[in-house]
Amino acid sequence: MSLTYDDVVAKYEPVLGLEVHVELNTNSKMFCGCSTIFGAEPNTQTCPVCLALPGALPTVNEKAIESTIKIGLALNCSIAPFSRFARKNYFYPDMPKNFQISQYDEPICVNGYVDVEIETDEGPKTFRIEVERVHMEEDTGKSLHVGGATGRIHGAEYSLLDYNRAGIPLVEIVTKIVPGTGKYAPEVARAYVAELRDILRSLGVSDVKMEQGSLRCDANVSLRLIGAEVLGTRSETKNVNSLRSVERAIRGEMIRHAELLNNGERVVQETRHFQEDTGLTRSGRSKEQAEDYRYFPEPDLVPVAPDAAWIEQLRAALPERPSIHRKRLQEQWSVPDKEMSAMINADVLDVVEATVALGADPAKARGWWLGEISRIANEKELAIKDLAINASDVAEIVALVNSGELTDKLARQVVEGVIAGEGKPAQVIASRGIKVVSDDSALMAAIESACAAQPETAQKVRDGHIPAAGALIGAVMKETKGQADAARVRELLLGHLGQSSN
Amino acid sequence: MIRNSASEMASKLASGDVTSVQLTQAHLDQIAAVDKQVHAFLHIDTEGALAQAAAVDLKRKNGDKLSPLAGVPLALKDVMTQKGIPTTCGSKILEGWRPPYDSTVVANLKKNDIVILGKTNMDEFAMGSSTENSAYGPTHNPWDLSRIPGGSGGGSAAALAAFEAPLAIGTDTGGSIRQPAAVTGTVGVKPTYGGVSRFGLVAFSSSLDQAGPCARTVLDAALLHEAIAGHDPKDSTSINAPVPAVVAAAKAGNVKGMKIGVVKELNGDGYQPGVRKRFEESLELLAAAGAEIVEVSAPNFEYALAAYYLIAPSECSSNLARFDAMRYGLRVGDVEGASAESVMNLTREVGFGREVKRRIILGTYALSSGYYDAYYGSAQKVRTLITQDFNKAFEIADVLVSPTCPTTAFKIGEKADDPLAMYLNDIATIPVNMAGIGGMSLPSGVADEDGLPVGFQIMAPVMKDERMYSVGASLEASLLSKWGAPLLSTIPALAGSK
């Protein structure tokens, strides 16, 4: 009989620890000049350094150091005036040197925090996640195990190695233990990773694509009886490749641990692999016996000693924290929470902001991006940012509607045309011959013929039954191929039939 | 012709008395005549060397501006990568590997049109003091073929003494340039750490390794030093500062007013009488040339050897991890169904020799959790203390001096089964590497008791390499006028030698 989540949190307190690996988006690798572009032919982005040919030496990518310092500053860390790289020694075929250059006891950033806000039963609540360290390291190559049933090395007939990823700059962000989140542990973890992702994106230091592995989370979970001091044995779940998975993996592990503990069994200290399809984890490498990585200072690299003035420059240039930025926008635009979340979830906040910055009314800008444009993106199964329309196009269209040069309906045609690649709004308007029929005499002719065609309806309006005007307006709009301003048509029609347009 | 110094050869090339092709061919002929006895070379690049020589001759004919050593041949220690040329480091595990890139030293040699004859023998991965640890058989000392030529760069030193090359490149982690120079009657210099790029030097111990020039005269060493040294952005530990004015110092050879410090701890017990006698004589000559001789003490040097044998193996255990049969070199046990792990294990078992394995195991142990502080950590502290000893001594003296080695060349096989006795050979050279300063060995004569060469070591502060050349050139000149001819002119002739 399996436990429910409520049973688990009634008895146990979860303690989390999160390790997030971020691939930096530098043009070249951490310790050599090779390209870092994702998806190249295997082993085409390699050189003597990242293949660990005899005699080759690493040199540090300054841009990667800058990005790491920015991350540290954004996470409220202290930046070490002196930090060192260290070698982490272990043998694995996808690691060319059979040691990884990382940082050990002298990381570049230490002691930071991230505040995350989640919805609780008592309303929004902020949790502070303390960051122990942020350090730099290099990624390994990739192994492809061929021939086995599982895609794992065990049972494979042979393995292929791709060293394109070997040496890609990685930043590892490690939290201190996170107690006190209770039943909200999965949501807090998710919110933390989401917040990190937003911060990293705002810094422009990483693509932060979880599905491509440029942001990876390892979730450590342990349980202890509520009120207990001593920490339980933890498991470390790897391969958690989406925000939803972070939440699911932690929830799943909490239940698994609780079942073991309730049955008097013990939790094994090990790495576990999250499986998207089942939402469960499977056992990986045991960590019962601490692996001895024989860390020692990397003698091929001089210590990193960033200039204090440079750090202050980077600090001064930091962008506003995304969560604070969002709050500010929400206030400025007076957007309800629900709409705000809709924009965030649809990933249009930035573009709406840009559209507003170009003069569009926030509500109009939001309406276009969340409405028509999102609809077209869904239809085409594309991401909004991959559509051929940008903030300035939308700002221009909004302005044209405001000035009466376009109706909403015509504006939709213009949006469609821009997305179809027909050019900028002005070009689409010109080439499609879109224009508002604003000539009152032409409209009056259409109104008269509509009234003549539907005399009974016209009479109803004359008798004061205003809603009946809709059918007549529709006929006029049809007659003018939608190019008329519906409001103006309504005004003229009602006047014609002896009614006030108010 | 092959018995000339490199600078004499350079003059003859410049004046047109000889072409580089002729000079190169003469050395190739000498190699063909004597290397079966000496075994200084692991690979001879006849075609490449002659092509390079022909290219220099053409440049000279065209009136191109050439560097001072253009057209002079050189022997390259097999620990340096040279594009397309086998690089084994004296190990089976790299048999057949041809690097796809030039080390910075080789790039600098090529830029200076120095002709590379081939690759010289060495103790496997530069671990040893006798070249007996080469997987391809030992090198023999041209002074006495039954004796060792020193190590790890025994091949480079022997090539000089056998007139197979007038110049050579060595690398020095604990004395691998200086000790072979001492026991073969040649000159060897370990520049300041970071003075010559390590890019393309197959690492033994990254924080100690340093490439440097080997030659038969102090001036030749200086010319080669200047050709290979300088800042290299590809080596993070490379010093970004101008190359010390070593050639000018070697040409002037002036010690007037210099204070020369004799290191008390590097003389005395354990040093062969003939070695001490030559050392004392050299001091007298330097004093006569105008230097002031003072005594300095370096109390922490007694821990240098022990600390070295923790740091160097620790770094080597990690540096040599890359030899795993996955991407290059030897591969053993790659049969149907074999795992990567078993191929790695078998390859390393077969590919590495005893001394290399001994040091990998030692280093792995020293870095292990629970032992790190006691071993690697303490050794690093000793290193700091040694540096402090040097700093204090250099407040008193401009350079420090000692015998290069406690003894002259020993017999091949004599210490093969006694690693500790072998390690003690480097007792006077190791402190220099620990502190990252410069060291030079030049011949001070032969020991009375065995007629074998004795080396005189000069040590200078970081990036003050020119001081070694001032002192070395002065002593060399005094000795030459005393002997009437260079020491190597007294070396017994090898059978078939030109």
Image (spheres, coloured by chain):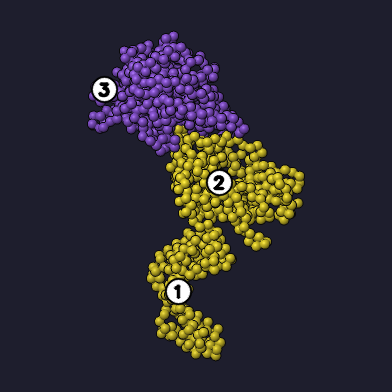
Chain colours: A yellow, B purple
Quadrant of image for the C terminus of chain B: top left
Q: Amino acid at mark 2?
A: Val
B169 up-or-down from A484: above or below = above
Q: Indicate the amino acid at tag 3.
A: Lys
Task: Please give left or right for residue A132 compared with residue A268 in the image.
Answer: left
Q: Residue at x 47, y 54 (%)?
A: A316
Tag 1 secondary structure: helix
Amino acid type at circle 1 is Asn
Foreground: B332 or B358? B358
The disc at residue A289 is none
Which chain does the numbered disc 3 sit on? B
In the rendered structure, the answer to whether residue A311 lies left or right of residue B10 reads: right
The disc label shown at residue B12, or none: 3
Q: Are marks 2 and 1 on the same chain?
A: yes
| Residue that mark 1 sits on | A402
**Residue B295, relative to residue A344: is it above or below?**
above
Q: Position of residue A280 (x, y in %)?
A: 66, 50
Subunit bearing disc 2: A
Are circles 3 and 1 on residues that touch, CB within 8 Å? Answer: no
- Same subunit, labels 3 and 1: the answer reads no
Crowding near the residue tagged with mark 2, few <14, some 14–19, many ≥20 C-alpha atoms within 10 Å: many
In the image, what residue occupies the spot 43% across and 75% down?
Answer: A403
